[in-house]
Image (cartoon, rainbow, N blue to C red):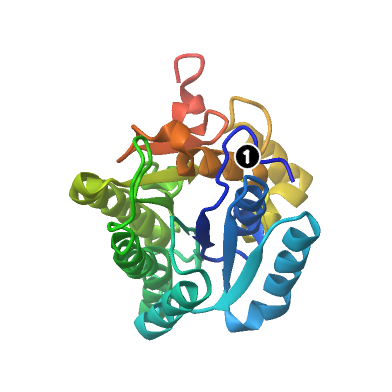
Amino acid sequence: MDTQPHSLQGQYALVTGAASGIGRACAFALADAGAAVVINHLARSRDKAREVVRQIEARGGRAIAAAADVRRADEVERMFSEVLDRFGALHILVNNAGVQDDAPIQEMSLEQWNKVLDTDLTGQFLCAQQAVRLFEMREQQDAQDGEALGKIICMSSVHQAIPWAGHANYAAAKGGVRLLMETLAQELAPKKIRVNAVAPGAICTAINRAMWEDEANRRKLLTLIPYGRIGTPEDVARAVVWLASDESDYITGTTLTVDGGMMLYPAFRGNG
């Protein structure tokens, strides 16, 4: 297993929503960098999570699966207790779990609103809160210069900044993630806990399959991406590993955008 260039050897990481998509890619990348990884999943995704664990172990890594719905405080607390029991410490949290449930505002139900806000925003708060408590348990250990007590990477979106008609719940959640991340970074920096975010643009995952599998939709989507290709989960995972590594030790409160230039507002090419 190649642990270069961003070695995480001897560290323990938890990735929420890691049974598929971006979370799955992050789990593989963290394991390849040397971390032991907790694969968080919903109960219905148990088989997928176990397959991720199996593949990580086949690559020479170490992983366990842990079921929890990040919307539920009791399940999150139980999951972090399991991490402490199994590993005795936590170094990295990748706050990745997220959903979409789209509708025009006049048709969006309160259930749809709450589902997305509870998962994409409240879930990140609950997991960050528990992670910080585990990070602080490491304060008695000898900390080396250039080594953070803990690292939190929040999965945001370009829609933390770009309005998205028909997706009010998702855009509101991701806007909240940005300020949650920045506020936690400000609050926790004196404790040597780094908090950053990754904001993907268009990525080939199941959540937006209709946009990249249909050729007409794909061509339309590519007009929004100056770099000329749709991103992969691995593009995001590489950014996550770097933010989790000591090579980014002086970086906190920052959003790393992984979008092929979508945030450059390509509609304004040629004077708009």
- Residue 171, how many percent across, how many down? 39, 54
Residue 225 falls in image quadrant:
top right
Residue assigned mark 1: 235
Q: In the current view of this chain or complex, which residue is farthest to the right?
A: 58
Q: Is residue 202 visible?
A: no
Residue at x 59%, y 59% (from the top left corner): 36
Is residue 15 depicted above or below 42 in this figure? above
Indicate the secondary structure of the residue bearing disc 1: helix
Is residue 130 depicted above or below 234 in this figure? below
Residue 105 falls in image quadrant:
bottom left
Is residue 125 depicted above or below 154 in this figure? below
Task: Using the image as rendered, state which of residue 74 and residue 176 is in the foreground.
Answer: 74
Neighbourhood count class around disc 1 (C-alpha, 10 Å): few under 14, some 14–19, many 20 upward: some
Instruction: Using residue 40 as the reference point, say whether residue 209 is left or right of it.
Output: right
Instruction: Using residue 5 as the reference point, say whether residue 11 is left or right of it.
Output: left
Q: In the current view of this chain or complex, which residue is farthest to the top?
A: 270
Amino acid on which the number 1 mark rests in the picture? Asp
- Residue 14, how many percent across, how many down? 51, 62
